Image (cartoon, grey):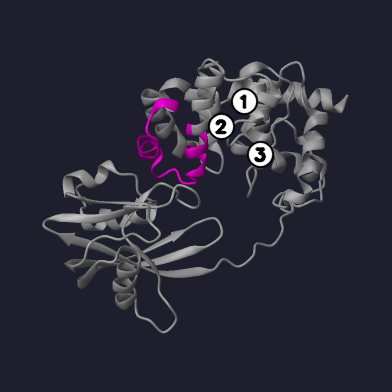
């Protein structure tokens, strides 16, 4: 009875309070899929302009699958977690070539696509196809944790099954699309990590954390490990009014993106010396530092970087790459045509504020 009331109140609240979002204006499985991939580990406000721009350029699986990966990465530039873009590009190609451009509604077929895991499958299959699958993301875990005083840590992957089991039990199998979005919306707008808006929540009498005055104690989290900070040196190398850039290997962190050559500063080494050494070791080019541009700080999931960026002049040498997979000498007007990591975009903004 309690679960039935929770579903009813939640859906009534969602109908009145849901945000107007571009991916909620369509029933196209492809567009819903794109939105869910973008929304993983990224805030809604950040995603909206990216989603709208991406869909304008790639309105269906065929246009995305047929596109050059570099163009796809350029449209993704700044969203981070670029493996999402690479996998979506590959998956769209498979949908186009093997499924006639129709996103599979079968669980097994959809889960075989690159980048499609349990959450993406549940979200897309429920929202786009009405399949009774409970989607469990961070917002959902937080809501469930407070509703039922679940003691397991929400950031402990080993405990995910506990939250999934509770989500499956609470799922409204007759309206899975609305229900899943309602729970996620409640977590995003009301049941937020700090200072939840319990006064306007539709479920206070059902929430054990609220009834027992423990909303600040839940959800439980594992203590985060200390994050290492790496000192990086990078060279913006000029020659004949052109700038030298290199492309990262397609697999791995920031795969396929372009950047200024550089790497870690060794113990006992200064950043300027590291800049010239890394340039020589990775490209075989000799150069001299002309001036210091800036220090860029940037955080990734498991580490942070502090990158010292130097303006350098070419001296001699032919390009022989060791590590990067490609290179270009580009003019100032061309450089924004290439997809760069956010850390390097910060350096570019200091170098060319108006570009």
Q: Position of residue 332 (x, y in %)?
A: 17, 49
Pick out the residue farthest to the right: 1
Question: Which residue in the structure is indicated by mark 1?
Answer: 124
Tell which of 189 and 229 is nearer to you: 229
> In the shown orientation, is residue 310 left or right of residue 152?
left
Q: Position of residue 141 (x, y in %)?
A: 71, 41
Distance of mark 3 from mark 1, alpha carbons?
13 Å
Q: Is residue 191 above or below residue 308?
A: above
Label 1 residue SS? helix
The reply to whether discs 2 and 1 touch (Cβ–Cβ < 8 Å) is: yes
In this picture, is 238 found above or below 169?
Answer: below
Q: Give the magenta-colored segment's residue range.
A: 65-89
- Residue 182 lies left or right of residue 340; in this view the side is right
State the residue position of label 3. 137
Q: Nearer the viewer, mark 3 or mark 1?
A: 1
Q: Determine the image quadrant of residue 76.
A: top left
Residue 69 lies in the magenta stretch: yes
Secondary structure under badge 3?
loop
Residue 218 seen in this snapshot: no
The residue carrying pointer 1 sits among few (fewer than 14), some (14 to 19) or many (20 or more) residues within 10 Å by Cα, namely many
């Amino acid at each position: 009875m309690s679960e039935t009331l929770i579903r009813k109140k939640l859906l009534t609240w969602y109908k009145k309070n849901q945000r107007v979002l571009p991916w909620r204006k369509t029933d196209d499985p492809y567009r819903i899929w794109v939105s869910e991939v973008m929304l993983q580990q990224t805030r809604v406000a950040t995603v909206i302009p990216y989603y709208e721009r991406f869909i304008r350029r790639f309105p269906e699986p065929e246009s995305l699958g047929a596109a050059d990966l570099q163009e796809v990465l350029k449209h993704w530039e700044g969203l981070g977690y670029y493996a999402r873009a690479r996998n979506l590009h590959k998956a769209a190609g498979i949908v186009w070539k093997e499924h006639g451009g129709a996103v599979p509604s079968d669980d097994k077929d959809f889960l075989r696509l690159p980048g499609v895991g349990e959450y993406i499958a549940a979200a897309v299959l429920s929202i786009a196809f009405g399949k009774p699958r409970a989607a469990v993301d961070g917002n959902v875990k937080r809501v469930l944790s407070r509703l039922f005083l679940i003691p397991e840590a929400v950031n402990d992957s080993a405990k995910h099954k506990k939250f999934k089991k509770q989500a499956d039990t609470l799922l409204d199998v007759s309206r899975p699309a609305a229900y899943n979005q309602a729970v996620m919306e409640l977590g995003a707008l009301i049941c937020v990590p700090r200072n939840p808006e319990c006064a306007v929540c539709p479920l206070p009498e059902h929430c054990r954390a609220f009834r027992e005055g423990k909303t600040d104690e839940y959800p439980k989290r594992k203590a985060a490990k200390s994050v290492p900070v790496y000192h990086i040196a990078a060279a913006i190398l000029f020659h004949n009014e052109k700038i030298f850039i290199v492309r990262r290997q397609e697999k791995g962190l920031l795969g396929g993106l372009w950047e200024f050559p550089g790497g870690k500063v060794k113990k006992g080494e200064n950043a300027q010396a590291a800049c010239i050494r890394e340039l020589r070791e990775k490209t075989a080019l000799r150069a001299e530092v002309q001036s210091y541009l800036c220090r860029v700080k940037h955080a990734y999931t498991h580490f942070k970087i502090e990158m010292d960026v130097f303006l350098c002049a070419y001296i001699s040498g032919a390009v022989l790459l060791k590590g990067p997979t490609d290179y270009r000498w580009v003019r100032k007007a061309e450089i924004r045509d290439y997809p760069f990591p956010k850390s390097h975009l910060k350096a570019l903004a200091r170098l060319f504020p108006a570009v």
